[in-house]
Amino acid sequence: MPLNFEKHAAKGNEFVNRLAARLGDEDNIDRAGRVLRCVLHTLRSRLTIEESFQLLAQLPMAIKALYVEGWQPMRSHVKLRTLNEFGKEVIRLDGLSAWRDFSNLEDALKGIEAVVKTMADYVSAGELHDIIAVLPEDMKDSFVVWSHTP
């Protein structure tokens, strides 16, 4: 079976372009990529290995690579109990770029919302439901709303 890297790159670019549009910054693909990486890495720190693999199975190949970048699956989960803590972790992971990507926690929450909405375009409703089920109660309502709105 031949590999079609152009097809995989195109699907990944489509995902990032949709995310950039949802972020209201269509011309800033770099920002969309940084926001996506930070949100995915924060999310994977909350998921079990099994749930991560189920999510990975549905993401475009290029996005899978971003998800697993630097992953150490056997490390313990980050204890994020609230949506605000999730947002603060996203900002922390953005490191030195955080000042460009998020002016405050509200911007980080909007970024998380944009990523969840974009994931909903690619991941089945059942898989999103499984992911939401393992999140803390404070986060579930927001993720449910975001995953069902365009």
Image (cartoon, helix red, strand yellow):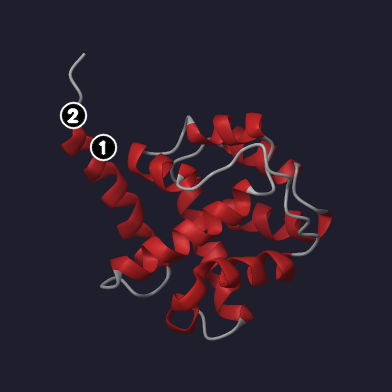
- In terms of depth relative to the viewer, which is nearer, 46 or 132? 46
12 or 148, nearer to the observer = 12
Q: Quadrant of residue 85?
A: bottom right
Q: Quadrant of the N terminus?
A: top left
In screen coordinates, is 131 left or right of 62? Answer: right
* Image quarter of residue 129: top right
Q: At 55% across and 71% down in the image, what residue appears?
A: 110
Q: How many marks?
A: 2
Q: Is residue 75 left or right of residue 124?
A: right
Residue that carries the numbered disc 1 in the rendered image: 8
Q: Is residue 93 above or below residue 129?
A: below
Foreground pick, 25 / 37: 37
**Disc 1 versus disc 2: distance between alpha carbons?**
7 Å
Task: Name the residue: 48% across, 84% down.
Answer: 99
Q: Amino acid at mark 1?
A: His
Q: Is residue 64 visible?
A: yes
Return the x and y of residue 146 as percentages of the image width and height. Answer: 60, 58
Q: Which dot marks residue 17?
A: none
Mark 1 residue element? helix
Near mark 1 (Cα within 10 A), the count class, few <14, some 14-19 or many ≥20, is some
- Residue 144 spot, x, y in % from top left: 67, 52
Q: Relative to residue 119, is residue 115 depicted above or below?
A: below
Mark 2 secondary-structure assignment: loop
Percent coordinates x, y for residue 20 in the rendering: 36, 66
Residue at image point 58% right, 42% down: 72
Residue beneath the point at 27% across and 51% down: 13
Q: Is residue 21 visible?
A: no
Q: Are marks 1 and 2 in contact (CB under 8 Å)?
A: yes
How busy is the neighbourhood of tag 2: few (under 14 within 10 Å), some, or many (20 plus)?
few
The residue labelled by disc 2 is: 4
Percent coordinates x, y for residue 64 in the rendering:
42, 40
98 is higher (above) or lower (below) than 66: below
